[in-house]
Image (cartoon, grey):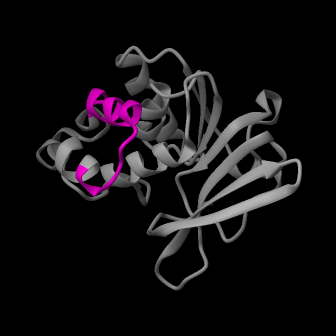
Amino acid sequence: MVKVQIAARGVADARVLAAMAAVPRHVFLEPGQAAEAYEDHPLPIGRGQTISQPYIVAYMAEALGLRGNEKVLEVGSGCGYMAAVLSRLAGEVFAMELEPDLARRARATLEGLGVRNVRVRCGDGALGWPEEAPFDAIVLSCAASHIPPDLWEQVAEDGRLLLPLATRDIYQDLVIAWKTPAGTVTRSLLPVVFVPLR
């Protein structure tokens, strides 16, 4: 998976590639999905949500530019797969999921893997996790029509926010926004398809 689907398509950060190799994607899925766990596409995880395509998870992780000591918020964590990858790249990860059963499942899976630097909360991710702010990086694993203002307020100075921005009919633009002393700097990265932020 890492060699053919991720590295061969341009993801070059050695820490990201190591994290993708170390996190077992199949444990975040139902047993009947094990045969497809390492295929190059998203898979359903219930409640109308999906576990993202491995390449996209790696691409987003690399785009965040994490070095190991950051505090990261993930919104729309679903089954916890992206949070598990981020746990190997950042100092602390705060994962928010709207659906209670998915949040419980993510928490149990992460604990089962021995992940100790991820906290999972069930709640409205658009509101963020204000008592733990500011965050060096915030990533949305769901699409929004705009940058939620509560989340932007929780980005640290010189921090960044990565999200699929719903600006097209079918696809979204994966956009990264940096909070700088001179103002907001944004860059469009690539077209993606994510479930919507609710």
Q: Residue furthest bottom?
A: 169
**Would residue 127 appear left or right of 52 to someone viewing this image?**
right
Q: Please determine whether, in this image, residue 98 is positioned above or below residue 135.
A: below
Kindly tell me whether residue 175 is visible in this rendering: yes
Q: Position of residue 7 (x, y in %)?
A: 27, 47
The percent position of residue 150, horizontal first and vertical second, equals: 82, 51
Q: Report which quarter residue 80 is drawn in.
A: top left
* Residue at left offset 24%, top offset 41%: 30
Q: On screen, 74 above or below 50?
A: above
Residue at image x 60%, y 47%? 139
* Residue 105 visible in the current orientation: no
Q: In the image, 173: left or right of 1?
A: right
For the point 82% across and 29% down, the residue is: 131
At horizontal 15% and vertical 44% (from top left) the residue drawn is 32
Q: Which residues are magenta?
A: 8-24
Foreground residue, 135 or 105? 135
**Residue 197, horizontal then vertical, whole percent:** 60, 60
Q: Is residue 91 left or right of residue 101?
A: right
Instruction: Report the label total.
Output: 0
Does 10 appear in magenta? Answer: yes
Residue 106: x and y in percent read 44, 33
Q: In front: 122, or 63?
A: 63
Q: Magenta residues: mostly which secondary structure?
A: helix
**Which residue appears farthest toward the left when viewing the image?**
35
What is the quadrant of the N terminus in the image?
Answer: top left
Is residue 7 located in the magenta-colored stretch of the structure? no
Identify whether 30 is placed above or below 88: below
Q: Quadrant of the C terminus?
A: bottom right
